[in-house]
Image (cartoon, helix red, strand yellow):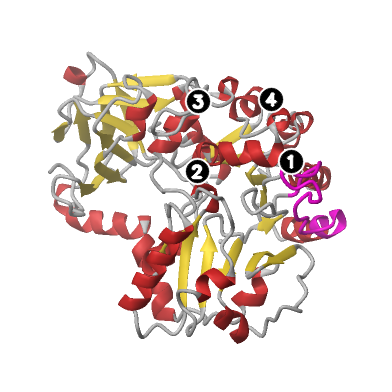
Amino acid sequence: MRKTMIALAAALLSSAAGANTLIDNVNGIQAGTDGTIERFTGLLIGDDGKVLRLVHAGDEARISVQVRIDGHGETLLPGLIDAHGHVTDLGFAALHLNLVGTSSLGDLKQRLSAYAAAHPNAHWIIGFGWNQELWPDKRFPTSADLDAVIPDRPVVLERVDGHGVVANTAAMKAAGVTAQTPAPSGGRIDNGFFVDAARRLIDKAVPAPTTAELDQALAKAQEIKFFADGALGSRGAWLKQPYADKPDSRGLQFHSDAEILSLADQAATAGFQIATHAIGDAANAQMISTYEQLHRKYPGDRRWRIEHFQIVDPIDIPRLARTGIVASMQPTHQTSDRLMAEKRLGTNRLAGAYAWQTVLKSGAKLAFGTDFPVESPNPFPGLSAAISRQDINGLPPGGWIPSERLALGQALHAYSRGSAYAGFAEGKIGALDPGKWADFILVDRDPGKVDAQSLARTEVLETWIAGMKVWSRATGGSPLERGK
């Protein structure tokens, strides 16, 4: 994508070769390398689309450029980087039945009925995004619930975290699943709800997307990752101690210590950077131990990643920095999950839950993302949650475990420099330092001068890539241009 844009830019600007551009009169903000806020008033861009220098008040008059663009005092931020998302899944979520935000089982049934009526020729009905924690009774849906709406076509509806699906009887029949079918190791079956490894029993029967559908999903949205456990909402996260609300379960361990070490060792030998999904404190401890062993075997800068790092035993957090492990976390999971986390764990086991500030104080690297389409791909609610530990409505008052709040500079760093570092890209993107790509956005408010809830509602006015404006809210278009 970047190479294509640069090539198009070269064609468009061939008559103005050698022209530098000054984006002037802006309220520029970025995170410094130490996580403090750095402000500037302009950005000087070379004809190669890379930053030449930041401009500060009083410097403008001494700069001679061919193209000068007035930013009209708007706030300019470096391009924010999502360290963890699922691009094709986001596309398919947009193409299939959308169950995000359903307020009850009845709401889910109504959406399912409406979708089925609107798509009479769909042989399978696939949906995504339901979360029973948002429903009054917090009960998982069952195959019987779906049968009551659609008895004659296979229906498979995926939970918001992607770690479980509920299937109707027609789908189970198509998959060859009966009431006597045992759950595989690392999975669970409960009245038509298939969790983690048990998903494969249903997934194998769902028609694979065609090439055209894959292209359509990717276009609609514009994975090699390991899993150590499941998700907290479906009680698949692997915990050191039993669930407070289900004392007979500690969740699902996907691999033995020997298995995960063998898999990771193979990937490390091949030169891959390893990223592993781990949510529960037992899964996170297992992955830290695995990476510690690999770190001794493979010296150098490997940047082992733990994706989510949600529920962690505080004694394990200091082990990250010593091994060079990156904690790749998603702030809006904390605001979405806090009540459920309290119920799953009990209030006395939350000290290492979504512990961003503790991670930073330990000396470890922190990268932020959204985990779209589990959460919205919009990064500004994440920035808001990171600095407030509150949702977009300001709940809970004072923030949830407020000692883990981040300063704005720290949160912005995790969404920019930190995420670039996590992908070995800190020399190219993540900040508007000289020599890096001039990727930035103009937004409608200064994140340092509004409250957290207003920050969550920030809107992008323009998007620039490699020194070119590629999108403008004013036109809704995607002009490949500079200086217009």
Marked residue nearer the N-terminal end (4 or 2): 4
Residue situated furthest top in the rendering: 58
Q: Which residue is mark 4?
A: 362
Q: Residue 410 has which mark? A: 3
Above or below — where is 374 with respect to 296? below
Gap in Å between the C-alphas at discs 2 and 1?
Answer: 29 Å
Amino acid type at circle 3 is Gln
Q: Quadrant of the N terminus?
A: bottom left
In three-dimensional space, the C-alpha distance between marks 3 and 4, rounded to whole angstroms, equals 14 Å
Q: Is residue 16 left or right of residue 450?
A: left
Which range is magenta? 238-261
C-alpha span from label 4 to label 2: 20 Å
Question: In the picture provided, is 316 more to the left or to the right than 391?
Answer: right
- Tell me if residue 449 can be seen: yes
Amino acid type at circle 4 is Ser
Point 22% across, 37% down: residue: 20
Q: For the point 58% across and 72% down, which residue is it? A: 143
Residue 435, quarter of the rendered image: top left
Q: Which mark is residue 369?
A: 2
Confirm whether residue 97 shows in the render.
no
Question: In the figure, residue 52 lies in which quadrant?
Answer: top left
The quarter in which the C terminus is drawn is: top left
Query: Is the residue marked by circle 3 packed among few (<14), some (14-19), or many (20+) residues within 10 Å?
Result: many
Q: CA distance from mark 3 to mark 1?
A: 33 Å
Q: Which of 107 and 29 lies nearest the eye of the viewer?
A: 107
